[in-house]
Image: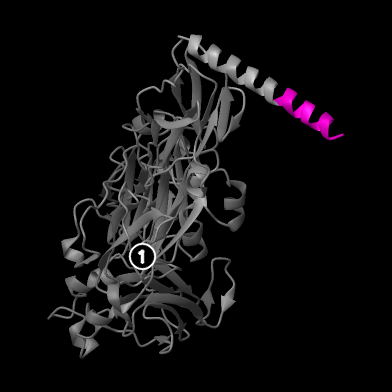
Amino acid sequence: MKNTILHWTSVLLASTALMLSACSSDEDTNDGPTVSPVFPDLATLTIPAGETSCEVTFTPNMDWTASIPTDAETARWFKISDGTMEDYSISGKASSTPVTLYVTTIDQETFDETPVCEVSLTMGGQTEVIARITRGNAAREFSLFASDYDTNEDDFIIPYVFSQSAMTKYTGTETSFPYENAPEGTVEMKWPTRVGEFMYVFKAQGNFEWLISTPEWINATSTAIEGENANQITLTGKFTEENIDGAVGVIDFYDASIDKDEDPGNNAHNKYCISMPAFRDIVRHPFANINGTFSFNADGKYLDTNGTENDALTTTVSSTKGLGIYAVDLHDNGWYYLTDWVTITDSWDDSGELFQSHSYTITATANDGAARTATLLALPASVNAQINDPLYDLFNAEGTDIKAEYKQYIYATIEQSGTTSDEEGFSIEVNSSTSHMVGEGKAATFVKVDSEQYFYDHMDDDYLINYYEYFMNGVPIYVLTYNSAAAEGGSVLFDIKGQYDNAMIPAADTWLHAEYMPDDYNPGVTMMMIDMSQGEASNKSNITFTSANGMQTYAILLCYRNY
């Protein structure tokens, strides 16, 4: 047994010796070079903003693996692709032709970050970085467009129409300014007659998610504009001590992803200046802000627009505290006084807002005399503080007129019918000498509106409807229509009976003329000839007969040119 083991040991040792001898012989006879990996020069590349990949090209002389880091920050932005699949590493075989890989990035805009990715190539047990890629960042874009305001209508154009030119951004560092020192480009809030506050409407467009920062006295709301990649921004002003005499503030549309008190740059903030006018001396009357008419019957009952009787007129007015409301009238002696037949009761909530809507009532005593009128003035707090004795302070030295500086605060007229008349009445009639030219199918038609039904029968006549309230308040309404040039050539005459001081035609209606002449045979009657020859077929205007101070309207003659 021992001999057998020794035999096989000898055989193994001999075999090993032969193998070692053979390997040594082969290596000694191999004269070829050793193969080493060849790496390309480092490439510095960029994926521009708006693009999602770039190419990395190399020619591998050995089997290879290309990879990018898998840390959370790199993996958030980048992957590597061979054009078919995306991963964090790609492998391949040696090649004599270039290999192109793609470093891809997520399709999302970055504004302040510039992520970097390195591509490493491993061949033959060695690894080198062959590309360094930077993701380019985008510039934030934001534009604000102001809506158009119709000063004639005192309102925004509805639906809103926005300027084609974007507003100029504010680049300063101040956040508030004295009202009189508003920076150039500041937009001032408006107060349309149909709403109850200062406001302005804008259109905002941006390529990032934004929030709005405003001063305390501005409230901002945002709603998407249907069919557009934009938002409607409505700014409304609050009434505070800070802006009671006017204020200018900065609104900021800033990136929602940042701390608004920090500024990383790249247009993360977009600022604009907005102003709100002073409101200390503003008075707003929702019922009738300018030249309104409040009608009372002879019993002292207020008649609303439906003709319904009410014990008093109750309405509201918006102002700061200290408003003074006065009723004055012109007596037969030509002097003004505080009206003794009108009582005004005002209210104010001391715990309410600085600028508030508060109720007031107007009552009138019964009238057993002729029709009468009173003028209502509403003096804002700072103006009212100057009135020590209304009987003297409101009127000129002679007492014959309201002082000029207070006329801007006239907002309404009270008209009360009476049980008797100072005159026999006021009327307009066709002069008998030309009555043959007036009538159905003739050169002219002339009617006195005698009932409310007339308005219902002519609902399509928008011009007539404007005078419905006058009619309901007892003002006679006449309608004169010239149907052919014969009415001009034949000189239709009309008789005006009763006293009046003014016969007014709107200044803009230069096509309408009226010529007056006394009737020598009828004292107290004035003959009138109306000329519409300069007009067009669709023209409509009016002649309004009033008292000297314009406070009382005796009649309105509507003139239609229908030829």
Instruction: Please give left or right for residue 36 compared with residue 174 in the image.
Output: right
- Quadrant housing residue 450: bottom right
Image quarter of the N terminus:
top right
Q: Nearer the viewer, residue 113 or 101?
A: 101
* Residue 191 position in % (x across, y down): 37, 61
How many marks on residues? 1
Residue at 38% over, 36% down: 134
Q: Nearer the viewer, residue 518 or 178?
A: 178
Q: Nearer the viewer, residue 520 or 370?
A: 370
- Mark 1 is on which residue type? Asn
Chief secondary structure of the magenta portion: helix
* Residue 172 position in % (x across, y down): 20, 56
Query: Magenta span has 11?
Result: yes
Residue 44 shows in the view: yes
Query: Magenta span has 46?
Result: no
Instruction: Please give left or right for residue 92 compared with residue 482 in the image.
Output: right
The residue segment tinted magenta is 1-12
Q: How is the protein colored in the picture?
A: one colour
Q: Which residue is mark 1?
A: 291
Q: Label 1: how many residues lie within 10 Å, few (<14), some (14-19) or many (20+)?
A: few
* Residue 98 position in % (x across, y down): 47, 14
Residue 561 shows in the view: no
